[in-house]
Each structure stands twice: as structure tokens, then as C-alpha cells.
Amino acid sequence: MTQEKELVGRLEIESIRKAFPHEALHFTRWLEEHIDVLAERLGMDQLSVVQREKSVGAFNVDLLCEGRNGQAVIVENQLEQTNHDHLGKLLTYLVNLDAAAAVWVTSEPRPEHQKVMDWLNESTPATISFYLVKAEAVRIGDSPPAPLFTVVAGPSAQGKVTGHEKKEWAERHVKRVEFWTEFLQRSKERTPLFANIKPSTQHWISTGAGKSGISFNYCILMDSGTVELYIDHDHDTGLRNKAIFDKLHAQKEAVETDLGGPLEWQRLDDKRACRIMRRIEGGGLAQPETWPDLQDRMIEAMIRFHAALKPRLDKVKV
């Protein structure tokens, strides 16, 4: 047991500044000669230093490196708490040197800057990567100190996918506002329905049907549009929603005759609400060139839909 204790040492962590008192003279020079230690933690192979203190206009990047495929990688060291100044420098060096990766080595990464690095990895193209690396010094017993690098933020395939999805979602919101703005202007010229409704980032807009929790809705999908009556009057058991739906469904033949076509009667037994819907094919959010014709057909469908269902809904006791 005594022999086992002698063979196993205790790892001690200390400030990186204790091992490297001066960032530029000591740490950056050491990293220049031992870039493979950092590269291993980053998962990069064949990373080599091209130049220390590479000039970028009036600034100097600590290390300009080259990756396996010849792409530029910049390393900015900050052996203190991260700040906005170094974040700005990191981005300046990355852009001006057309680098594929930016590595920010620090002794104290702030959570706010970690979030920024995560955001950059999500929001930039898959060919660009950002790393935030915490630097500490470790020793065992009386051994010389050794730098320990921990990656606290870095790129991932899932992160890039998430970023792409967020971008698509934001673009979709813009398109919806454009669609509804045009749509509501056209609608006002033909009917007072939806006259007081504003454009939305949602895929639907609604107006009250005269009973709490029941509304007439328009929906715009990527490949079609819909008009619908959405029934969610009963927020407790949902039983009254089914009862309202059933009373309207009992008049299905007359409603569809007045409307001039079939409807989708969605009782939605596995959900609380119910829906009566008509789908308008031949266009969608993804095809702006179809919007004028699709909007006209959706408005015409809602006028007939409302005329067929509203009087019958008014007679239903809830």
C-alpha cells in the first residue's frame, strides 16, 4: 500500500500566470514551439505556426498558423478574464487573414463570451470555426508546471445544423410578414373580415367568430394555404368543443353545398380542439410568384366559408 502511494501523485492546478509571468514573452513563445499540445486538444492535426506577432494593419495577431489543408488558423492569447477588446481583435484577425478558424486562449472565459462563441459557430458557414480555450497550469508534486487546455466552446456538426435552422426560421418570419401584409391589403378591398388584423410572423392569422375560443383562421404553409374554423371554446375537458363540432358536422351536406365544395372535418379526438378546414392548393410561402393568385383564392374561399358557417355557428348553444 505504501509503495502504491509513492507511485501515484496528486495533480495540482495553479494559475497559468504562475508558469508564464509574461504573456507575450513567455506564454506565446512557448506555444509557438509547442503548438501541437494545443492542436491535440482542438482535434486538429498537422497544425504549424507560420508567424508570431503577424501584422494585421495596426494590430498583431499572436500566432498565425496553418492547418492540414493549408487554411489559416489564428490564435489570440489572453491570460486574464476575457473582454470585448480581444473578442473584437479575434474577429478582425479572422476576417482580414481570411482564416478558417479562430482560437481564443484565456485563463478566465466569461460566460457571456462563451455564448458569443457558441453563437458564432452556429451562425457562420460550416467552413469557419471558433474555439474558446481555458488555459491552466498543472503539476504533480515537484514537477515543472505544464499547461492544461480545456475547450469550453467549439464548433460541432449539430451546432451548424442548428444555426442553419435558425437562419431559415428567421427568413421564414420575414416572408410571412411580407405575405400577410400583401394579403390583408387585398382582403380589405373585398371584405370587412380581418380588416383590423395586423401582419404576423406566425403562419396563421385569426379573427373572432363571435364565441369565446372560436375563430376563423387563415394559414399559409410552404406549399398551400388554408381557411378554417378553429373550435377551442372549452379549455377544460374539451367536451363542449366536440359538441359544437358535432352540431355543425350534422349539417355537413348543407354547408358544403352552400360553400360549393368539400371540407376537411377534423374532430381531432386525440386533442382538445376541433377544426373545419378547406385547403387551397397551387402555391405557398415558398413560391412568392404564386402569392397574388393564391391570396385571391384564399380570400374568396374565406368569404364563402364564413357565409356558410357563421349563421349556423350563431345558432349553436355553447
Image (spheres, grey):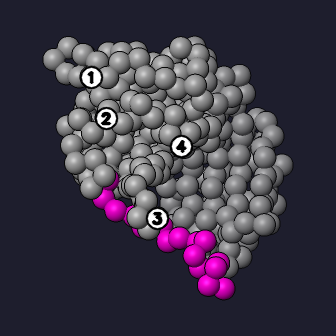
Q: Residue 86 occupies which quadrant of the picture?
A: top left
Residue 214, position in %: x, y?
A: 57, 60
Q: Which residue is mark 3?
A: 140
The residues tagged by marks 3 and 1 sit, at their Cα atoms, a distance apart of 33 Å
Q: Which residue is mark 1?
A: 53
138 relative position to 159: left or right: left
Given this view, does label 3 or label 1 mark the residue nearer the observer?
3
Q: Which residue is mark 2?
A: 28
**How many marks are shown on the rendered structure?**
4
Asked if disc 4 and disc 2 are in contact, CB closer than 8 Å, the reply is no
Mark 1 lies on a secondary structure that is strand
Amino acid type, callout 1:
Glu
Q: Residue at x 72, y 36 (%)?
A: 279
Q: Is residue 55 above or below residue 253?
A: above
The residues tagged by marks 3 and 4 sit, at their Cα atoms, a distance apart of 20 Å
Badge 4: how crowded within 10 Å, few (<14), some, or many (20+)?
some
